[in-house]
Image: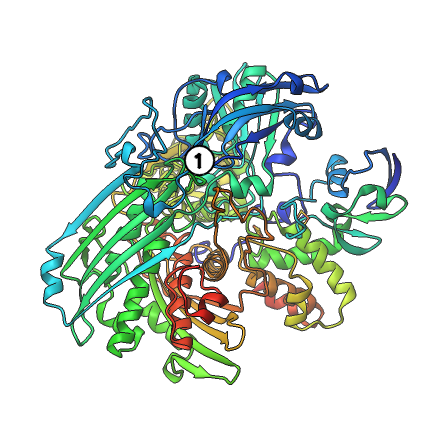
Amino acid sequence: MKINIRVNGKMISDDVACDMLLLDFLRYHGFYSVKRGCETSNCGLCTVWLDNKPILSCSMLCAKCDGHEITTLEGLKKDAEAFAYFMANEGAEQCGFCSPGLIMNVLAMEKELQHPTEEMIKNYLAGNLCRCTGYMGQLRAITKYLNRHQGGKNEADQ
Amino acid sequence: MKQINKPTVKKDAYALLSGQPVFTEDLALKDCLVIKILRSPHAYAKILNIDTTIAMRIPGVEAIFTYKDVPSSRFTLAGQTYPEPSPYDRKILDQIVRYVGDEVALVVACNEETALKAMKLIKVEYEVYEPLLDFRKAIDNKIIVHNEDDYKLLCEIGNERLRNICSHDVTIYNDVDEIMRTCDIVLTRTYHTKANAQAMMETMRSFAYIDTYGRLSCVSSTQVPFHIRRILSNALEIPKSKIRVIKPRIGGGFGAKQTGCCEIFAAFVTWKLKKPSKIIYSREETFTASNSRHEMQMQVTIGASKDGIIQAIDLYTLSNTGAYGEHGSTTVGLSGHKSLPLYNHIKAARFSCDVVYTNTMTAGAYRGYGATQGQFAVESIVNELADELGIDPCELRFKNMVKENETMPMYYNEFLNSCALDRCLAKAMEMIDYKNKPLRVDLGDKVRGLGVAISMQGSGIANVDIAAVEIKLQDDGFYTLAIGATDMGTGCDTVLAQMAAECLECDVDQIVTQGVDTDFSPYDTGSYASATTYVTGMSVVKACNLLKHQIIDEASVLLNVEPEHISFDGKMIIAIEDDKAISLQEFANRCFAGGKGKVLIASASHVSPTSPPPFMAGIAEVDVDKLTGKISVNDYVAVVDCGTVINTNLARIQTEGGIAQGIGMALFEDISYTPKGMMRNNSFMQYKIPTRLDVGSIRVAFESSYEDNGPFGAKSIGEVVINTPSPAIASAVAHATGTYIRTLPITPQKVLLQKDED
Ligand code: FES
Ligand code: FES
């Protein structure tokens, strides 16, 4: 079937199998930041935005995205870089395989939640698995990132 | 020191954090052939017939390979130094399948969908055998897992294949039985740790192609590229000179990728068809058909005097290697050799072990490598001893723990150069305010308990691990550092560059680390056994010092001065007496300028005669819900002695990550099988790894000793960090509830029912 999806602001028209997953579609079109870590919608590695809301691209048919807008990490250069700075300074990306999905969800959370508590952050991101870091470094990076306008940046620089 | 003990940002941080295509699957050729594997539904069977005719008719199917098509040599997938102490007990495809998931046929097609369609049309006739599933019944069972005559051993490992014994060993230090008789208290307990999945986020994957020179190139997510080259050579029966293995970024390994996996399939298909191919394991395949931690059952007897001086320990470990023997004999060794030396003042010890075959998935390497299992047993019985004697568990440890400058009879008689374990424990107690907290507090609907454990590991394998590096001075005065060690997210590309920058007195950015390509990288046994920082790090120091000498010698020629007059501060090469100076940049460019120039390259390799242990102390504060039995770890404090910390951020993250994995092992992770031998936990639905809601707060600190044999005083950190959670949490739960759970994981059911086995 024919579909038109706007990915990171650019229209992609394609003829796809009706059961093609958005994840495979995106990787096929070169959005390699999108990773697969499971087949059971448990890991969060494949997180992208559909009309600015985070979704699991492994559980979404690309046919359903026809006429919609998808954002991947490749399309978020500036915001993603700002957060990446805090992650890098904590060393909170180890293998980095889970990072794109996490970043997509953190940036979505930032838009959605006002001044989230640690508990709220943990709950929002509970679906983003990471086997390397033990999550503590990610939490430090996220907290510092969210507080960056209150001098959090200096703290991360130390 | 300018570069050591700094939170240097990882060299690959921004590439990873912006989602660059740097992993195996990202690099595979877009239209290459796709391999899917038909796997055995039976735990033990012989293939009588495979009919692929109908499957082959599907358009897009390129080939289907069965046991009839592959070379007949047996080999091991264990990524270990030759001669491997793992039996050569497997083929690329075998007529006998030995566990549910064992490979039956390789389906090669233009895409995944076609391959899967064809796979369904292959007809296989099996002669199904009764499987051997319980490793406690393996020895002398009438079912023999490896009955084949072409089974091969390269090392003496106490193997008795026909009794299902993959390996056997005994280490004795003085007369344990005699010392036990003199003890005021003797306890005997049995502990059982389960198979755990490493569960790295990137599943197993490889792709292969034929290069310009007709050689086989294999790009793979592996920790051991040089071992993979040997494994492919063994499996495909082609010379190593025809094989090149490339390691891109790896999405985690934790030991899983210290064992070969799907490389043999991609390599075989590409070599046979002379076409590029890739194989990407699903999560289910990675769970059910790669490798896991060895399940172990350990019987420990401990003897002590009334005042809590431990006199003797007797440990017997039974380990399940599953269908094939990868890492069997070596992991089990660590269960004793890295647990008993913690109590080095004992007068006698005995450690005996058997590793057995069963018809379950092969076990392999997983962070901690047997030490984790052994320490669960030994640390647990020490905790139980403390409770029996009414002595505080920390106090009991201070009375008995190993100290600096001791010789360790149960640790290959090595001398302990560096050890801050006592400081680690003291600091951990301070961090959690131990002195002011009772071991048990009733909180109404919950009970809170405290539990402690100490741990050690090694730093590389003494006299076995070898690492070489090569450093070159490039134009404009930057350096390239070629290493054979594999960064799997652990950050060794950065840590080794920090060391080089420290030696050459430059910025880390001036060192370009080159990851692994067996054609271009100097040999390194690979990233496992906590070897990289310690062993490869030493080679970096050696090579950099050589290069420095070369720079001075060459500068003396170029400047026409005595080498003794020259000093080099990383930026300027100066001969004060002669009033001459040249910047490194200009010097490097002159080196490249022909005529008088000389290209400067230094290489060095290192083998360590010892494996200095890093140490750690961990204390868990755990809440148990009285009604539901739910166990939550509120607070975990850990203090590590890894010698000098090279990268403060990465060491901390390693520790936090290891503890989180340890919490998973303690509380949820449990590979189990149906009575027919099918693995129950084949997805993240059934196999729960900790989420960020499960880890409470993990707090980490360092108490460094200084290891003379390590680079800048460093030892290892990668593995020691996973060991303390299981025993510490088990003890905390026991303090809270009065029930000692000796079979992991410690589930609410076990706690509520006060029943150990499930
Ligand atoms: S790939 Fe695991 S949740 Fe989408
Ligand atoms: S950094 Fe490796 S899985 Fe998160």
Residue at point 42%, 53% (across, down): B194
Q: Nearer the viewer, residue B612 or B49?
A: B49
| Above or below, comparing residue B15 to residue B191 in the picture | above
Residue B739 visible in the picture: yes
Residue at point 34%, 37% (across, down): B466
| Above or below, comparing residue B89 to residue B450 in the picture | above
Q: Which x, y percent locates residue B255? A: 44, 44
Q: Nearer the viewer, residue B141 or B209?
A: B141
Q: Which x, y percent locates residue B618? A: 39, 67
> In the rendered view, how is the structure colored?
rainbow
* B677 on left or right of B386: right
**Is ligand 2 less than 8 Å from the beta carbon at label 1?**
no
Q: Which x, y percent locates residue B542? A: 35, 40
Residue type pointed to by label 1: Gly
Residue at point 57%, 53% (across, down): B686
The residue that mark 1 highlights is B484
The quarter of the image holding the C terminus of chain B is: bottom left
Q: Chain of mark 1?
A: B
Label 1, residues with CA under 10 Å away: few <14, some 14-19, many ≥20:
many
Residue B511 visible in the picture: no
| Above or below, comparing residue B394 to residue B529 in the picture | below
The quarter of the image holding the N terminus of chain B is: bottom left
- Picture quarter containing residue B278? top right
Q: Secondary structure beneath disc 1?
A: loop
Residue at point 21%, 64% (across, down): B302
Q: Which x, y percent locates residue B262? A: 52, 31
